[in-house]
Amino acid sequence: MDAVYRLTAAILGDEADATDAAQETFVAAWRQIRGLRDPERFDAWLQRIAVNASRMTMRASGRRRVREIPSSRVPSLDDAATPAPRSDAAVLDAALRYLPVEQRSILVLHHLEGRTLAEIAATLEIPVGTAKARWFHARGALAKAIEAEEADS
Amino acid sequence: MRDGDPGWSDERLAAAFRERSVGRDTPEHLEAATMARLKITQPERRSTRWLALAAPLAAAIAVAAIALMSVTSPRPPDSAETDAAPSVGRATAPVTAPPPSVPTPPVITLEFPSGPHRILVDVVDRSGRLLRAAKASPPVSPGRPSRSIRASAVAGHPDQVHVEWFGGACDPTTQLTIGADLTSIRVESTDSRGVDPGALCRVGGSPRGVILTFDGPVRVEDIAIVGESPGPILQAAEALGLPVITVEEALRHRNESLDDTELAVFGYWYQPPITTTCPLIREISPVRPVCNDRGIWLTASPMADTPQDRPVLPPTDAALQPLIRDAIRMEGGMPVTGQPVLVVGHFDDHRAAACEPSVADECRGSFIADVLLDPANPTLDLDRVETGGPILDVDPVANVRNVERAATEAPNEARQILAAFAVPGGDLARYEPQAAEIPDLADAAAVWIVRYRDASDDGRPIVRTRLVIDGPPPLGDGVYEATSSGVSAVD
C-alpha cells in the first residue's frame, strides 16, 4: 500500500489526489485481478494501474472548483512571515506541475522507482523506443520547468 | 549530468525525487477506506484458473500481494549513484483484513434532500488550531438536486465513520453537515443553528472529499530519537502565581491525586513532522484528545526533531500530551520541537463531566492547556489574552477589558484572566457543550468564553470558566458560570 501511495503521490503531488488514486488503484486491481495472467508480473501490473488511476484522478481533479490543500502543506499562520528557503524537492515539486501526468509518470518510474526504460516500457505496455522517446521529452520538459522555477525564486 | 541534458544531473534529480517523497506517508485511513470499498467490490470474471478461489480467499491473496509489494524498496536508476540515500518509503505492517472479532462496518447510503444546502466546514492545522471557521455564507446548491453519500464505520474504530460524498470536494464552499450520530448525517437547509459544531473538515488526504474531524491514532513508530542534553534553561520558578513543576510531577499529580488544580508545567515541545489524516467521528469533546492532539508532546527532556528519513517516534522520557485547542499561544506562535516551554493548564476539566462514560476517565486525564508561556518570561497581559483566541467568524461589540470586569468583578489580581475569546452562540457546543443547551447563550450572536484563575473552596489554584453574552458595555446581564455540574447564571 505504501508503494502504491508513494507512486501516486510522486506523480500527482497532491495528498488528496494521491489518496484518491491509490484507493482507485486497489479497487481497480481487485476488479481486474482475474485478468492478471502472470502473477510474477504483479508489480508492473499494479504500477500500470496506479499510473492510469493517477491520470484519471488528475482529470477529475481538474474539474474541481477548489483544490484541496494537504493539511501538511497549509502554512501555519505563525509561519507566514518566515518562508523557508527553497529546496531541490520544492523546486522539483513546482516544476512537475507544469508537466502532464504521462510525463510525470515516466520520470517518477525512472528516477524515483528506479525502473529501467525497458521495464517502464513493459509496465506501460509500450515499445521500448516509445518509452525512450517519452522519457527524453519528459526530461527536457522538466529541465525547462526547473529552469523557470529557479529563475522565479 | 548526461551529455546533452540541460539542467540538473540525474543524480540530483533522483535525490530531489526522494526528498520530495519524504514525509508523504500513506494516510492512516487509506487502508481502512480501501478495505471497505473492496468489500463491496466484486472482481470481474471468474474464468481465470489460478484465481478460481472463493472470494474472501482471493481478496486475501490480493491484499497480501499488495502488502508484499509495499515493502519492496525502489531501486536506484541505472544512471543514479548506487550509494545514493536510502529509499524513503517506509515498510509498514502488512495490510490485512480486519480481525474476525471486528464487526463488519455498516454501509449506509443517504440521500441529500433537494434544494439549496448549507454545510459548514472548518479548516484546522496540524495541531488542531482553527485556521478558518465556516463563514455565514449564503446557502449553496449542489450541481444536482440530490446526491448520495456513503458512510461507513472504520474497521476497528466503531466510534468513527468515513463519509464519502461522491462528486464533492472537501473545501469551504461545498459543505456537508454531520449529525451527532451516524444515522443523522444530513444536509442542513439554510439555518446554521442546527449544524453540529463537531463537524470539521481536515483539509487534505481525504478520498473524494471526505469530511473529517480529528480522531484516530497518530501513527508513531517504534524507536525513540532522543536529543542532546539540554543546556541551561533560564526558567522562572513561578508563573502566573503558580509554582513551576516538572512533567514528572504533573504526571504524578494526575496518577495519584487527580483534580483540577491549575499547574504550570515546564518541559520541551515535541511535535513530529508528520502528516495525519483524521477520519470523522460522530461526536467530539472539547476535552478528549483525538487524532492530531496526540501528536503534540511536552517532554521532560528535549527530543530532537525527527529527521525526514527516519520513522516518527514517541518520546521515551516522561511526557504529557497537552490538549492545546483553545490555549493562548506563546508570543511568536507555536513552539517548535525542542523548545523549552511552560504549559499552564489542568487535568480534570469541568467539561469532562459531559463525556460519555466510556471515555470519562480519558477526558478527566486530559491535560487541558490554557496558556503556553516562555519559561524565561512567563507573563501574560490582557492584550495577548484577547488576540490569542480562536479565529472565528464573529465580531464582538465588547472588548476584553469590558469582559474582564463583567466576568470576574475585576480588576481583581486574584482572578487573572488566562483566556477570553468570543465565539458565535451557535458554535458554543464546540467549546462548552453544556452551555449550548441554554437558549440565551446559544441564540446570542457572540458569547465570550472567559477562563480565569481563581481559588477553589479548599484553596487550590483552579481555572473557572464564565460565559458572557456580548453587547455594549457595561456588561453584566447574561453572565454564566460553567462547572462540572452544568451552566448557571451568575447573579
Image (spheres, coloured by chain):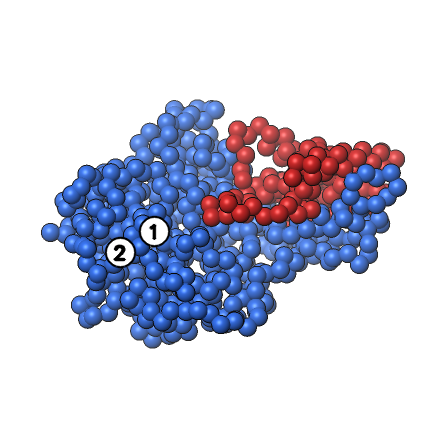
Chain colours: A red, B blue
Give how far across and how far down residue B71 sits, in percent. 70, 56
| Residue B384, numbered label | 1
Query: On the rendered structure, is B188 left or right of A87?
Result: left
Q: Nearer the viewer, residue B146 or B83?
A: B83
Q: Relative to the observer, which residue lies in front, B323 or A46?
A: B323
Q: Please give the residue where the numbered disc 2 appears in the rendered image.
A: B417
Quarter of the C terminus of chain A within the rendering:
top right
Write the residue at 70% across / 34% down.
Answer: A148
In the rendered image, residue B270, in percent from the top left (x then y), is placed at 50, 62
Disc 1 marks which amino acid? Arg
* Image point (78%, 43%), residue name: B8
Nearer the camera: disc 2 or disc 1 = 1
Is residue B127 visible in this depiction of the protein? Answer: yes
Name the chain under label 1.
B
Q: Quadrant of residue B180?
A: top left
Q: Which mark is residue B276?
A: none
- Residue B430 in picture, x, y percent from top left: 33, 47
Q: Please provide percent x and percent y for residue B11.
A: 79, 49
User: Residue A64 sits in which quadrant?
Assistant: top right
Crowdedness of circle 2 by 10 Å Cα count: few (<14), some, many (20+)? many
Q: Give SS at disc 2.
A: strand
Position of B429 relative to B167 (above/below)? below
- For the question of whether residue A123 can be seen, the reply is no
Secondary-structure class at tag 1: helix
- Does residue B52 appear to the left or right of A24 in the view shown? right
Residue B399 is drawn in which quadrant? top left
Pointers 2 and 1 in contact (C-beta within 8 Å): no
B370 relative position to B71: left or right = left
Please state which amino acid type lies under the numbered disc 2: Ile
Q: Earlier in the sequence, mark 2 or mark 1?
A: 1
